Amino acid sequence: MIEIRGVTKRFGSFTAVDNLSLSVRAGEFLTLLGPSGCGKTTLLRLLAGFEMPDEGVILLDGQDVSHLPPYRRSVNQVFQSYALFPHLSVRDNVGFGLRMQNVPAPEAAARVAEALEMVSLREQADRLPHQLSGGQRQRVALARAIVCRPKVLLLDEPLSALDAKLRHNMQLELKHLQRRLGLTFVFVTHDQEEALTMSDRIAIIHRGRIEQLGAAGEIYHRPRTPFAADFIGQANLLQVAVVGRNGTTARVRVGGGLELTVASAELPAGARTALVSIRPEKICISKQRLDTENLFEATIEEEIFQGATDQLRLVTTQGTRLHALVANESAMQEAFHEGDRVYCGLHLDDLVIVQAE
Amino acid sequence: MHAPADPAPLPGDRRHPGWIAWALLAPMVFWLAAFVVVPAAILLVYSFCERDEVGGVVFRFTLENYQRVFDPVYLRIFARSIGYAALTTAICVVVGYPVAYTIARASEVWRHRLLLLVMVPFWTSFLIRTYAWITILKQEGLLNGFLQAMHAGGGPFNLLYTPAAVVIGLVYAYLPFMILPIYGSAEKLDNSLIEAAYDLGAGPVRAFSAVIVPLTMPGIAAGTLLVFVPAIGMFAITDLMGGAKVPMIGNVIQNQFLQARNWPFGAALGVVFMLMFVVTYGLLQRRGARLAG
Amino acid sequence: MKKLHSLLLSLATLVALPAVHAAGEVNLFGWSEYVPQEVLDGFTKETGIKVNFETYASNEELLSKLVAGAGAYDIVQPSDYTAEVMIRRKMLAPLDRQKLTNLKNIGPQYRGMVHDPEDKYTVPYMTGTVGIVVNTAVVKDPIKGYRDVFQPKHRDRLVVLNDNREIVTWAFYALGLPANEVTAANLAKARPVVASWIKLVKVFDSDSPKTALLNGDVDIGIVWSGEAAILWNEDKKFQYVLPAEGAHQFVDVLAIPTTAKHKDEAHQLINYILRPEVAKLVSDKFPYTNPNLAARRLLSPEQLANPASYPQAGNLQPFRDIGKAAADIDQLVTDLKSAN
């Protein structure tokens, strides 16, 4: 659907998008995820036509649109601030694009009504934007964009202005809408949880480049770079030294002396040091001795109650500090408290090598 | 938008301003009373009075002055003044809008520089600036000299002391009053709204007419008010650049005080003029209110 | 009668004017651009009396300020017909001629004039006429009177005073009507003449009618003689002609209002201005006709040869006060102008 080939965009001496290539498949929900200033918004603006690339091409349905103005591209955007026209009613806001494209009035009216129905705003059609709640405005912005039947819908942090609960509802609503309409969504966010919830694929953008591109689960479970591991979810990043190899496994040693076994597949031959990522919830904790590889003992230094989960700060006997996450126990399960000595276990596959040299 | 029901009043949150608030307001109240209310009241009283032979005001009630205002002589002058002011306002909008919009969209550094340039003419006296235009437009002036140097046929042209010269002078004098309010509303214009218009398929022209103009309408309305009303009453430019050939309502009012010894009639004209201002303002406000919903 | 400039100037001076009435000062309310500053400075230097100078733009402005009781002026400078009404309304104090030792310098033809037959209240300051100035480099036909000026061939080449009474009075002269009998019947007779004249005029300007002539925008003007004299000094091609049908002669006088608080100082200043060498300063700056014959003897031959300052004798008449008829004239001219 969209082909981005070697696109570079500079602002003065700052390179916002750096020789980036990416293809977006028809009907998928692709999220551009990254911290602010990473270039994700610039990339979206390049797709929308608000910026023109300095190098590279952007193909939309096989057609080079790199230098077409926004009004000649069949993509539409939902703006972060919604950008609703304050002087127009909800109905006129939604109908704006159709009017600009000279869609005959009866057809336009029908499509507007349909779009308003879809976002449950039929009742509010004659209100002005400032008379709506935040969530309603968000839906107007959405309806205004999809009523044009774009090939690709671009969404620039559309949920960031909503409160947490509403945002969660809207995430699901958006996702359902996308599935129902079979539209291609390119969604920009800096919120990794939102990205994981909604996306078919996530592209992690860092310093104008794609750090990692993949399905949500793959990105979470198998981060490829320290940045990806750190940015998505939480991660214990451990600097290790390779101390031995044995077929499909390798032994590595953490600073204080703790030794662990990792899968050697991702460890290049000859690598002497590596960075290992461990998701906190993957650390298995018990007061009983566990029957597992990578077993070690630790003391609970601090317990932080987080509702559904407890966050534990562990110190191994070798002095390595780790974050762990455990489901908040029911009365049937073991309870952990500060000062407890526990056994920790890690599965081979949960130790992800994100860097090696 | 509906405010939630009033909570119980807090100590510092009173609906009725205390004496400190009144003290703070006092200078403005005094200013308004001394320089707006009192003169307007005097004008109103005079307009119903008779005059004596040396131009004094005799406090005897009469409606004669208002009857005279509606004499065709003065109605025609009112109409002409409004016509000139309307033309001036229209030109100011057409010329001032692109200027204001460009300034508002410029980078911050340039915005300040350009705004300064708009305001620089205010640093010299209005008369000096008007005389500068006379120097440009007169028969042996800069413009005719330039045209002759370019070998444009037919010259020298009669530029000064024509209606066109009056309009040039009026536009020149009032253009900043159009530019500044439009700049004010264009500067507040959210860029993403323009992008949204483009995104939804509006080319530059339609984005301008369907989004930018309606959203900067408050600036246009304020500018119109600031240009149109004073332009109706302007007399110096018609005298200096128009050769005082066609009297404007401002000239007529001025004459009542300085030549005709008829203060009450001048006051009546002034009152009618003020009413016109109120009506114009009311119409614009209503229109603005409709736009804001 | 430099309306615009002086309107603004007087606003400025109004602000600067101190309100105190200490001894040793005198408040002069005069025409703008008519009293040289060096005259006032010289007086202050010699006597130590401070002169507070405020200006006005028209006789009507002077009248209305005095009627309204605004300001405490010690000397005013009305034109003859305004002085006449002020005397009639007892707004001027009789002068103490003992104190005006230099009064003898005023020529006999400027004494006992119609506005003040006994010379009780006023002393002539400067006099002048309203006449025709012709750019002889452009206009070759002989111009003798109003009828020669207001010809279709001179359309858009004319500047005249922006003064409605002047314009109507010229029509009266052209029609042979008595200049000061402003009656409804006479105005009706003058109306078609004024209407046809106004169509021919390019510029109406009382403040500085010489500008349009100097700039080449017009070739003929009917202007104050002082303006014409300055034009002649600039270039001898600007010839001054007293209209054959009759011309307005005005005398601007010095007088003391009855409300004056510094009558003694006022007399001193008037007497100072009457000195030949001081009156000469006025002529140097504002080349109207100087009624001070002793001062005239100090003028250069060129100054005396200026035909606008010292024209050949003509049919000269003063304006008389016309009271409320001023408004009828105003409406007539306004109507005709706006019919253009």
Image (spheres, coloured by chain):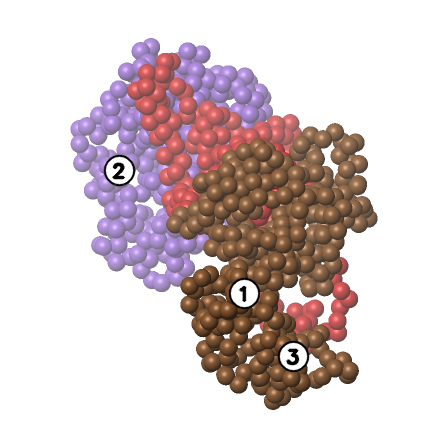
Chain colours: A brown, B red, C purple
Along the line of sight, the residue nearer the viewer: B109 or B96: B109
- Camera-nearest label, 2 or 1: 1
- Tell me: residue B33, above or below residue C339: below
- Asked whether the viewer can see residue C112, the reply is no
Chain under disc 1:
A
Residue furthest right as drawn: A123
Please give the residue where the numbered disc 2 appears in the rendered image. C285
> Which percent across, then down, holds residue C170?
45, 22
Amino acid on which disc 3 is placed = Asp
Along the line of sight, the residue nearer the viewer: B264 or B128: B128
Amino acid on which disc 1 is placed = Thr
- Tell me: residue B118, above or below residue B168: below
Q: Residues within 10 Å of mark 1 (few under 14, many from 20)?
A: few
Mark closer to the chain start, 3 or 1: 1
Q: Residues within 10 Å of mark 2 (few under 14, many from 20)?
A: some
> Which percent across, then down, holds residue C219?
35, 19
Query: Which secondary structure, mark 2?
Result: helix
The quarter of the rendered structure image containing the C terminus of chain A is bottom left
Along the line of sight, the residue nearer the viewer: B162 or A30: A30
Q: CA distance from mark 3 to mark 1?
A: 20 Å
Q: Quadrant of residue C228?
A: top left
- Residue at x 43% of width, y 15% of height: C155
Please give the residue where the numbered disc 3 appears in the rendered image. A291
Res. A248 mark: 1
